[in-house]
Image (cartoon, helix red, strand yellow):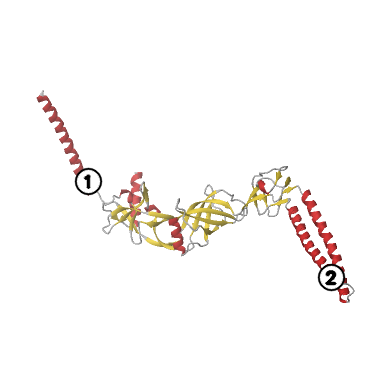
């Protein structure tokens, strides 16, 4: 029994040794093959700086410049409405009518009072003028003249008060026509005809102005610093493009004319605002859009060809050659795309050399063969020919 176990174990050990031997031989052969395999041919480009106008994208939202609640300024029954929900209205256009009878009567009464006091004052002025001549000749007592003067002055004060009441009555009468305070688009009617309204009733409807219109958007604080650095200031009038839902570009450019005075600690962004002309009312309050904000001044930044920048789960990277022409995998951070190049914000600088073609067979830390662009074209042509065969 023991003999059988020993034989069995010996066979297993021998199998393991044979397998290890084959694996070792395979590794040696593979190593020799790798040594004999020619280094991959690559094209190399030196990183240069370019003067570019930086631009930054951010999600934005359309916001009306004015959002006005239309209120009743007097109390009364809502008698008429002169618009439909969703209509575009002009400033001063009559939207509602509150029953005017009470206020018309108050205006007429106040007007009649003004006329009455005016007539009394006119008579008192004439009497005083005659009395002034008589008192000079001592035909009437000075006390009588003073009484006439006092009466005239009292009537003047009464007339001023009556005129104020008349103006106030006319003001209230004017409020029976509820007018649009701004140009814009009318929202939902909150109070319908026939209801009793007053200043405490709340908004009868709401008007959102449409032209011009605002776009508010958050800009990352690091992008904001880059923008401020390139322009030499933190708040300049900058050109803004607008991309609508679906990627369509809005035909009119806007101007960034406002920024918040703080960084939002919860999002790490600065709230910005741009103003756009909206003559055809294409932009609607509350709509979500994409904003592209352009700096005013160009800056020198390192750029790399888009085709040379690859990406994996860890981020974007390039193959950078060291002083011995050995490629190293280097992760980079990119800004916006400028033509056929990425703007490099971190990881590369002017003078660095990166592989731009042939990097498919490159292994970090292994030698490569640097060839000219013309030679690389020939190699690619030969590869295509071989593939067709």
- Give the number of the disc on residue 33: 1
Q: How many marks?
A: 2
Which of 382/243 is in front? 243
Is the C terminus in the top left, top right, bottom left or bottom right quadrant? Answer: top left
Which of 130/173 is in front? 130
| Residue 78 lies in quadrant | top right
Name the element at disc 1: helix
22 lies above or below 342: above
Q: Is residue 339 visible?
A: no
Which of 197/206 is in front? 197
2 lies above or below 374: above
Of pointers 2 and 1, the one earlier in the residue sequence: 1
| Residue 151 lies in quadrant | bottom right
Residue 215 screen position, x and y as percent = 55, 53
Is the N terminus in the top left, top right, bottom left or bottom right quadrant? Answer: top left
Q: Is residue 121 visible?
A: yes
Name the element at disc 2: helix
Which of 86/37 is in front? 86
> Residue beneath label 2, please?
143
- Label 2 and label 1: CA atoms lie apart by 135 Å
Q: Residue furthest left?
A: 3
């Amino acid at each position: 029994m023991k003999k059988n176990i020993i034989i069995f174990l010996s066979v297993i050990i021998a199998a393991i040794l044979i397998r290890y031997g084959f694996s070792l031989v395979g590794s040696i052969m593979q190593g020799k093959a790798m040594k004999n395999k020619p280094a991959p041919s690559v094209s190399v480009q030196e990183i240069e700086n370019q003067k570019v106008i930086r631009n930054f994208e951010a999600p934005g939202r359309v916001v009306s410049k004015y959002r006005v609640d239309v209120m009743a300024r007097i109390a009364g029954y809502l008698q008429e409405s002169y618009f439909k929900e969703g209509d575009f209205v002009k400033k001063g256009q009559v939207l509602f009518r509150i029953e005017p009878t009470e206020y018309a009567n108050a205006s007429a009464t106040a007007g009649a009072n003004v006329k009455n006091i005016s007539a009394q004052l006119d008579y008192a002025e004439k009497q005083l003028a005659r009395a002034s001549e008589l008192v000079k000749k001592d035909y009437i007592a000075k006390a009588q003249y003073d009484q006439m003067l006092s009466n005239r002055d009292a009537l003047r004060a009464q007339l001023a008060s009556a005129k104020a009441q008349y103006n106030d009555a006319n003001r209230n009468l004017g409020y029976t026509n509820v007018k649009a305070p701004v140009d814009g688009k009318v929202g939902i009617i909150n109070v319908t005809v026939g209801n009793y309204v007053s200043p405490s009733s709340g908004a009868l409807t709401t008007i959102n102005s449409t032209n011009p219109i605002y776009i508010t958007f958050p800009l990352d604080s690091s992008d904001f610093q880059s923008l401020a650095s390139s322009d030499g200031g933190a708040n300049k009038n900058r050109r803004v493009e607008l991309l609508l839902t679906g990627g369509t570009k809005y035909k009119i450019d806007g101007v960034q004319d406002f920024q918040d005075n703080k960084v939002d600690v919860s999002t790490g962004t600065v709230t910005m605002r741009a103003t756009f002309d909206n003559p055809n009312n294409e932009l609607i309050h509350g709509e979500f859009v994409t904003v592209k904000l352009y700096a005013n001044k160009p800056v020198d930044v390192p750029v790399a060809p888009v085709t040379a920048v690859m990406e994996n789960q860890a981020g974007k990277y390039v193959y950078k050659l060291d002083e011995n022409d050995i490629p190293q995998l280097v992760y980079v951070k990119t800004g916006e795309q400028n033509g056929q190049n990425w703007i490099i914000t971190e990881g590369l600088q002017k003078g660095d050399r990166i592989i731009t073609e042939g990097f498919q067979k490159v292994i970090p830390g292994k030698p490569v063969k640097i060839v000219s662009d013309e030679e690389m074209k020939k190699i690619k042509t030969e590869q295509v020919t071989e593939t067709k065969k």
